[in-house]
């Protein structure tokens, strides 16, 4: 006997393969189990009927067992009509999860009408939480309590509800109880490996039929389930899905994608410019920076400076929510910008050696830089307040610090800003302009933070403002789309 819901056939969104292709058992079962797992009895019945003549011979015999089992599930839900009585309170066990409460006003093969506090609600049997239905069948309430427990069928419904461990345990218990039901439980246990394989096929169908946008959403959040990648359904359909998913990724990138290519926080700054901020609350923000040697700086036109005790020296790294460099440290942002461009940050500086006098003449190089071409040409503010343009081996002193302006050496929470706009370079400390000069030699480049000297620097609240260079952005967009595509369709 089938529940009337099983007769409400609904057309499948898309069959897993062409009508002239034979299906293996796993794919065939997956085609209807997906609907059972989604609590849709009618669609499951329709899907099972549509498999007639489309499976390899061994699978056809197995599906006969599945058809009988589906009929029992439908019958179990239909039987609720006779177990829930008009005028009685709705059984607590049946409404435990879905929180159905009230007095039963009507019950039929389709479902039930309940009145609670004057409010009438209609619910289809299959809309109840299936785990509650399984528990109710396994241990009936009231007058039904004298009936023999339906542990095998209840266990199977519990498996479909998502509690595989407990559900299969009930089926195992039923197989040891003797009688015809025990034989059926044994057959169900024998089919378990194939059924669990089919669950993966069902999950693959559900995900792949969700469309390109859903695949993109999963790729950007939780990633693709590795178990699904191993299915025949996925292998068969992946190639055909690539164009649609790629198109969805391109549309997403046009809306939000620039934010996806940075670990820092990106915001629109108007006029095509962006603002990228780093508070280093998360260690992965350093992934936007290239940490390591920068030959053009190491062998630039600077006097030789010691980095101090090599055992204490270490490159930039995130510690305690700040960027910390000791002795020698280089960090180059991996993005290229066009001007106007600005780099600002907060810095704390202290000597590497404990107890050393805070001598403002201590030899050191602290170079925050912008408009860097990666080949030794850049605009920098030594110690945050002395503007230089470096052209390979030729330093150009653009603007010494204005007398009386703040110094950065051994400062605490000094706010440094170096910027270039409309052909003018400026630097400031704590909002006080330290230097300004005309500069027209470069308009495009990266930003960096460079330290060499017996010092410990702690950098926080880094903000980069500028327009991402179009060719760099296009390359980053292409790389991001390929990476996201690999996550969406591994």
Image (cartoon, rainbow, N blue to C red):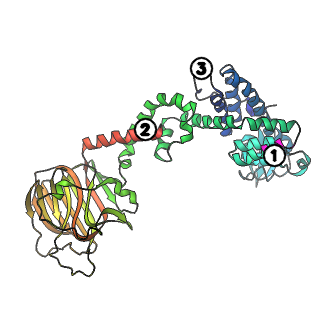
The percent position of residue 426, horizontal first and vertical second, equals 15, 62
Please tell me the numbered disc located at residue 477: none
- The reply to whether the C-beta atoms of the residues labelled 3 and 2 are less than 8 Å apart is no
The percent position of residue 3, horizontal first and vertical second, equals 78, 34
Helix, strand or loop at disc 2? helix
The residue to which callout 3 is attached is 21
Density class for disc 2 (Cα within 10 Å; few <14, some 14-19, many ≥20) is many
Q: Residue at x 53, y 30 (%)?
A: 235
Q: CA distance from mark 3 to mark 2?
A: 28 Å
Against 369, is 478 above or below?
A: above
Against 384, is 342 above or below?
A: above
Picture quadrant where residue 284 is located: bottom left
Helix, strand or loop at disc 3? loop
Density class for disc 3 (Cα within 10 Å; few <14, some 14-19, many ≥20) is few
**Nearest-to-viewer mark from 1 and 2:** 1
The residue to which callout 2 is attached is 485
The residue to which callout 1 is attached is 173
Hey, which residue is sitting farthest top in the picture?
A: 20
Query: Which corner quadrant holds the N terminus?
Result: top right
Q: Earlier in the sequence, mark 1 or mark 2?
A: 1
Q: Is residue 389 left or right of residue 75?
A: left
Against 49, is 431 above or below?
A: below
Density class for disc 1 (Cα within 10 Å; few <14, some 14-19, many ≥20) is some
- Find the magenta span and give its range: 171-177
SS assignment for the magenta stretch, majority: helix
Q: Residue at x 11, y 59 (%)?
A: 301
């Amino acid at each position: 006997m089938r529940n009337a819901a099983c007769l409400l056939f609904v057309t499948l969104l898309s069959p897993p393969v062409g009508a002239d292709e034979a299906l293996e058992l796993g794919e065939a079962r997956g085609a209807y189990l997906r609907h059972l797992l989604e609590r849709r009895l009618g669609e499951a019945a329709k899907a099972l009927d549509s498999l007639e003549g489309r499976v390899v011979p061994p699978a056809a015999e197995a599906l006969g067992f599945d058809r009988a089992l589906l009929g029992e599930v439908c019958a179990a839900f239909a039987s609720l009509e006779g177990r829930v009585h008009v005028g009685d309170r709705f059984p607590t066990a049946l409404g435990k999860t879905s929180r159905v409460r009230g007095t039963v006003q009507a019950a039929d093969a389709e479902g039930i009408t309940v009145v609670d506090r004057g409010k009438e609600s209609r619910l289809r049997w299959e809309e109840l939480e299936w785990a509650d239905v399984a528990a109710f069948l396994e241990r009936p309430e009231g007058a039904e309590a004298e009936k023999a427990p339906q542990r095998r069928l209840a266990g199977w419904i519990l498996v479909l509800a998502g509690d595989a461990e407990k559900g299969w345990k009930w089926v195992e218990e039923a197989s040891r109880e003797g009688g015809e039901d025990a034989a059926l439980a044994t057959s169900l246990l024998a089919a378990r490996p194939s059924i669990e394989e089919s669950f993966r096929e069902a999950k693959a169908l559900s995900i792949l039929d969700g469309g390109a946008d859903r695949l993109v959403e999963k790729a950007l959040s939780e990633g693709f389930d590795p178990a699904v990648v191993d299915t025949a359904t996925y292998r068969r359909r992946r190639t055909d899905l690539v164009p649609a998913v790629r198109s969805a990724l391109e549309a997403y990138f046009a809306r939000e994608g620039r934010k996806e290519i940075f670990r820092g926080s990106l915001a629109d700054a108007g006029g095509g410019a962006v603002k990228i901020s780093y508070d280093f609350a998360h260690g992965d923000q350093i992934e936007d920076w290239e940490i390591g040697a920068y030959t053009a700086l190491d062998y630039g036109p600077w006097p030789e400076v010691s980095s101090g005790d090599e055992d204490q020296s270490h490159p930039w790294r995130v510690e305690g929510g700040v960027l910390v460099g000791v002795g020698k440290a280089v960090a180059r942002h991996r993005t290229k910008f066009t001007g106007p461009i600005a780099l600002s940050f907060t810095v704390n500086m202290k000597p590497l050696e404990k107890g050393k006098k805070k001598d403002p003449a201590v030899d050191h190089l602290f170079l925050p830089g912008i408009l860097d071409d990666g080949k030794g040409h850049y605009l920098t503010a030594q110690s945050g307040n002395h503007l230089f343009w470096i052209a390979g081996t030729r330093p150009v002193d653009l603007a010494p610090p204005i007398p009386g302006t703040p110094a950065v050496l051994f400062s605490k929470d000094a706010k440094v800003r170096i910027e270039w706009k409309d052909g003018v370079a400026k630097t400031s400390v704590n909002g006080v302009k330290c230097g300004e000069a005309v500069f027209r030699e470069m308009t495009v480049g990266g930003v960096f933070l460079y330290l060499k000297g017996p010092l410990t620097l702690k950098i926080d609240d880094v903000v980069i403002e500028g327009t991402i260079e179009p060719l760099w952005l296009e390359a980053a967009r292409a790389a991001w789309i390929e990476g996201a595509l690999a996550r969406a369709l591994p």
